Image: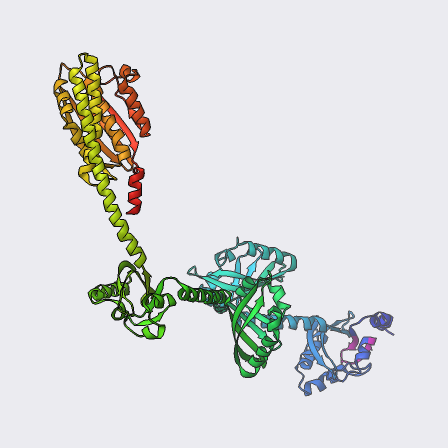
Amino acid sequence: MTDSNKKTNADSPLLDSLLAHVAILDTEGTILKSNKSWQSFNSENTLLKRANIGDNYFNVLQHAIEMGDDYALKILLGVKKVIDRESSSFSITYPIETETNSFWFKLTTRPCNTDHTQFVMIHEDVTPSMKAKYEKQENEDRFQVKFEQSPDGIFITDFNGNIIDANQTASTILGWSRNQLKEISMGAVTNVEDPKYREALKQRDKSGTYAMELDFFDKNGNIIPTEVSSRTYRNPNGKLRAIVTFYDISRRKEIEQDLSNTRKFTESALNSIPGVFIVLDRKGNFVRWNENMVTTLGYSAEELTKKKATDFVIDEYKDRVQETIQRCIEEGEVSIETKLHAKNGHIKEYAISAKRFVEDGKVYIVATGIDITKQKKIEQEKQRHQIMMQQLFDNSPVGIAIVDRDNSIQNVNSSFNDIFGYARNEVEGNDINELLAPENKKKEAKAISLATRNGESLQTETIRMNKDGEEIPVLIGSVPVELQGEIIAIYGMYVDVSTQHNYREKLEAALSEKEALLSELHHRVKNNLALINSLVELQLFDAQNAELQMELQNIKNRIMTIASIHEVLYQNGNLTNIPFNTFIDELLNQSVIEDSKTENKVQLNTSSKSIYLNINQSIPTGLLLNELLSLIFAHTNKDQMSEVNIQLKQYGQNVHLVVEGNHLIQCPKEMKQNQSLHNILIQTLVVQLNGTLLWPSPDTDYQKFEFCFTKEEGTSPASDFLQAVE
């Protein structure tokens, strides 16, 4: 046995421990030795069998070649090159198909002794790696197809967000060419500072993926809403990459916005319904409702989902409502008025209209309800008012007739019958003016009717005739009845004033007599005052004392002042109001005043508007003016001519009597404090009139007395009585 054979036998245990199929063949291709893996695979039914020991392997290859196996030819040629020393070794990876499996083997042949007489042939099972290789290639091919033909835009980016590659869809969506996209980063196509995007990147760092909605920017800066997903992977070089897949959801967003707008519009429309809107199933359960259902009845949405429609109905209406729901299901449409419980305990009345509709084979009821609680109350109140107005019409002590726009009588009350003697059936349909107005009053009656038809309310005292043709003095009130801007009827109201008319005639006669007596009384008072004045004047002639003469002269002035009031009152003919500006003119024209003006070198000027005072204020005001003039005459500078201006003004109800001029009196401060009769009378008259007197300032040459008081509208008790009678 040669050394090489010894070595081969010695290596048998080693060969059997190998998983690879190993055989030793000679230069002729005969199998000299094989391991257990070779021998066990030899039973597989395949073209490239493992030859048994002693068989020629070249014959096995030749048979496979004849059967069309190209790999058998490659193996035969390669092994012979090694045997012929044309190549030091030969390797090839080839497939084998059995009845049950597919295998890939890597064949390696090389000499196993130095003299090149034996050769080792090793068949390694590389099936897993080859399958992985082809699967990888297949996946890569599939990815490339998907990458190129995907309807979604795809980016491949590095870890910093730089775009490494982009497919055609991404280019189409964003408007950049693929080469342009490869030169930019994610920051050019989206807002990478968006907190949502930053959070998505953090999520991808943890889980390797994210999905979100994100706004992309196209080449022109337009915003494109997209749905984005991303997944990280490592390339064959171990570098981290990310696949970013996105698709344009603009149309979907538009549809969603349209749906949202439609939903909002529907909700707004339902919530704008002036009442409640509900949808019920055939059992009366709530399916849908508007906000008014919650706000008007006070129940929450959660409470409504647990209730039926009949739960809100008061007990006496429950059966009727349940029957109405059933009738709506059968007939398709119903209407009903019912009363509902609000959550706060109030009971509200609703007018409900309902219709049936079918959706997906299920029967529903859609209903709208209008709160008629106020309307019912208004109707009840209107009915109550109608009853009250009818009772007022029937029982009024005033005669009332209702006429239309043509003056045709529509209705009269019992007081009308009492005044004019007509029964109701006798006057209905007659022209009221033709029926009641005398011939000399028909024109007046027609004017009243015309004015009332034009919207005026009138009241007048006139004459009308009763059924017997007798004239009756009546107070007529004519009131238009307006509806929606149109006069639809006229109320004619008649008050019989026959008794009052008689009383008034008697009072007017008595009043005329009293006015004549009062006028005569004032005339006689004036005459008596003139007589007293004459007596004082006689006494003045006999007086030798100058001081006494001055006092008697002052008394005479005061008497004449009072007489002037009565003279003006008598001449005016009005016993309640006196034209005080006329009195001032009358007072200043008296001989006593004229003499005092000349003696004391004083010129009096008056500037007064027409102001009327009653007798209670006229007399003290006149006396006060007289005292002021007497004071000025007594204490003015008689060496130079003085000019005194008298003004009477009225501001609202305030009356101002002003006496002013240069150097009216000497030492006005001391004069004011002097307790002379002039001052005592002035102070008393100011208090009587409840007024205020401002004395001249001692610091200026131009001096002014100003007296202010509030004008009274009332008069003396006698004149008050006369005015009330009038």
Residue at (25, 67) in percent of width and height: 437
Q: Is residue 548 above or below residue 114?
A: above
Residue 708, quarter of picture:
top left
Vertical placement of 558 versus 391: above or below? above
Q: Position of residue 247 (x, y in %)?
A: 52, 67
Residue 567: image x %, image y %? 18, 34
| Residue 32 vs residue 640, the one in the foreground | 640
Residue 104, x across and y down, in percent: 71, 76
Residue 512 in view: yes
Screen quadrant of the N terminus: bottom right
Q: Is residue 484 visible?
A: no
| Number of residue marks | 0
Q: Foreground residue, 411 or 670?
A: 411
Q: Is residue 722 left or right of residue 173?
A: left
Residue 637 falls in which quadrant of the image? top left
Most distant residue in the left direction: 598
**What residue range appears in magenta?**
22-36
Q: Is residue 358 left or right of residue 512?
A: right
Residue toward you, 555 or 27? 555
Q: Is residue 392 magenta?
A: no
The question of residue 26 being in magenta is answered with yes
Horizontal arrangement in the rendering, residue 37 relative to residue 629 (left or right) = right
Q: In the image as oriented, which residue stretches furthest toward the top? A: 545
Q: Name the residue rendered at 28%, 34% in the picture.
A: 616
- In the rendered structure, the answer to whether residue 413 lies left or right of residue 174 reads left
Q: Main secondary structure of the magenta part?
A: strand
Q: Where does residue 511 sit, x and y in percent of width and height?
A: 26, 46
Q: Could you say which is closer to the camera, residue 703 or residue 580?
A: 580
